[in-house]
Amino acid sequence: GVNISGGIRLDPPVAPKPAVGYQGESFGYITSDVPTGRIEKYSYTSDANSSDVGTLSTKRKRGAGSASSTAGFVAGGDSPTASASIDKFPFASDTGSVRSAGLAVGHQFGGSASSAENGYVLGGENIGMPYSNQIQKYSFSNDATAASDVADLLSVIRYNSGTSSTEHGYS
């Protein structure tokens, strides 16, 4: 990979995404961990409890969340070891997730960022590596293409969070 500082360039620019959970236009989403693997939705316009809208394809925790304009994604996680799965769930309907292409290597405990076109998994813990500096990138629109290791963080890190600006991802 390529060493970077100050974030990775995310093309094309997109509005910032939350560091935790998934952002739709009218609702926010969060996934729960084992044993339920539940996908919950909460309203931005009313003060009401969240509702259960589906489940992940594999019940797991510690995944990296990203979002496109139409769907939320959970990449990796612990089930009970580092998973290479990527789940995708649509914002337009209250349904569970479907499996998308996988990560380059199983991952957990990392941060995440989003561009308009791609999700990024930042650092964390990969199978065979207790700490990782990898930046894995996956496509929101092509479910058949697996993630690839596209760059490196300056140091190995896990238990990190990530966020996005209109031009960069940060961990």
Image (cartoon, rainbow, N blue to C red):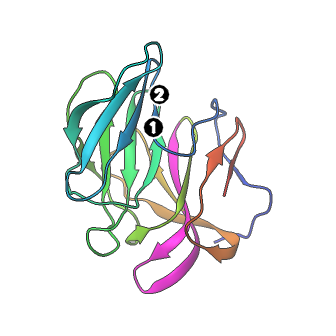
Q: Which residues are magenta?
A: 117-135
CB atoms of marks 1 and 2 within 8 Å: no
- What kind of element bears circle 1? strand
Residue at the image point whose x is 22% and y is 57% from the top? 59
Secondary structure mostly seen in magenta is: strand
Q: Is residue 41 above or below residue 97?
A: above
Q: Residues within 10 Å of mark 1 (few under 14, many from 20)?
A: many
Q: Nearer the viewer, residue 118 or 7?
A: 7
* Labels in figure, total: 2
Query: Which of the two discs, 1 and 2, labels the residue nearer the N terminus?
Result: 1
The residue wearing badge 1 is 22
* Horizontal side of residue 3 vs 95, given as left or right: right
Residue 118 magenta-drawn?
A: yes
Q: Residues within 10 Å of mark 2 (few under 14, many from 20)?
A: some
- What kind of element bears circle 2? loop
Residue 41 magenta-drawn?
A: no
Which quarter of the figure is the C terminus placed in? Answer: bottom right
Amino acid type assigned to the residue bearing label 2 in the image: Ser
Where residue 93 sits, quadrant-wise, is top left
Rendering coords of residue 23 (x, y %): 48, 31
Residue at the image point whose x is 55% and y is 80% from the top? 131
